[in-house]
Amino acid sequence: MISIEATRKIESIAHPKVQNIIRVCVEQGCQFKPHPSNPNLVNLFDPVRRKNIIGDINLLSERGYFTLEVENGRFKTFRNEVLGLDINRDDFEYKVLKRLKR
């Protein structure tokens, strides 16, 4: 069960696809963590893996913005060509969730 605070934070995400991705992750046990240097961003922490799985989530971005981990442990925006994700495609949510399960 998702806490009321987490539900409010999820509902405050401006982009519906980002909102759906975050909801699925929180339902599976992930937690919101404040960004260490920017109060406008939050990270999504997976307590099982003991690390952030999604970084720099901008709750107010209507275009949808967050970062994902790449091979060398650094985070890059999903719009980066290396990741090959397009938020305008129908399979965007599926591809992001599949990538997170690795």
Image: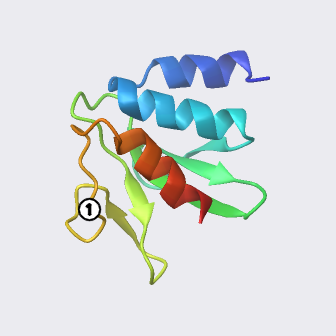
Which residue is located at x 76 percent, y 55 percent? 47
Which residue is located at x 19 percent, y 66 percent? 81
Instruction: Give the side of residue 31 with respect to residue 1, left or right.
Output: left
As drawn, 66 above or below 23? below
The quarter of the image holding the C terminus is: bottom right
Between 95 and 61, the one lying in front of the other is 95
Between 78 and 89, the one lying in front of the other is 89
The image quadrant that residue 65 belongs to is top left
Amino acid of disc 1: Gly
As drawn, 15 above or below 93? above
Residue ranking furthest to the front: 91
The residue tagged with tag 1: helix, strand or loop? loop
Q: Residues within 10 Å of mark 1 (few under 14, many from 20)?
A: few
Which residue is located at x 41 percent, y 25 percent? 13
As drawn, 12 above or below 38? above
Q: Position of residue 100 (x, y in %)?
A: 55, 57
Residue position marked by numbered label 1 in the rendering:
84
Q: How is the image coloured?
A: rainbow
Instruction: Give the side of residue 27 with respect to residue 18, left or right.
Output: right
Instruction: Give the side of residue 85 with respect to residue 5, left or right.
Output: left
Q: Position of residue 35 (x, y in %)?
A: 49, 50
Which residue is located at x 57 percent, y 47 percent? 44
Between 1 and 87, the one lying in front of the other is 87
Instruction: Give the side of residue 78 with respect to residue 95, left or right.
Output: left
Q: Position of residue 90 (x, y in %)?
A: 30, 35
The quarter of the image holding the N terminus is: top right
As drawn, 79 above or below 17? below
Report how many numbered discs are placed on residues in the image: 1
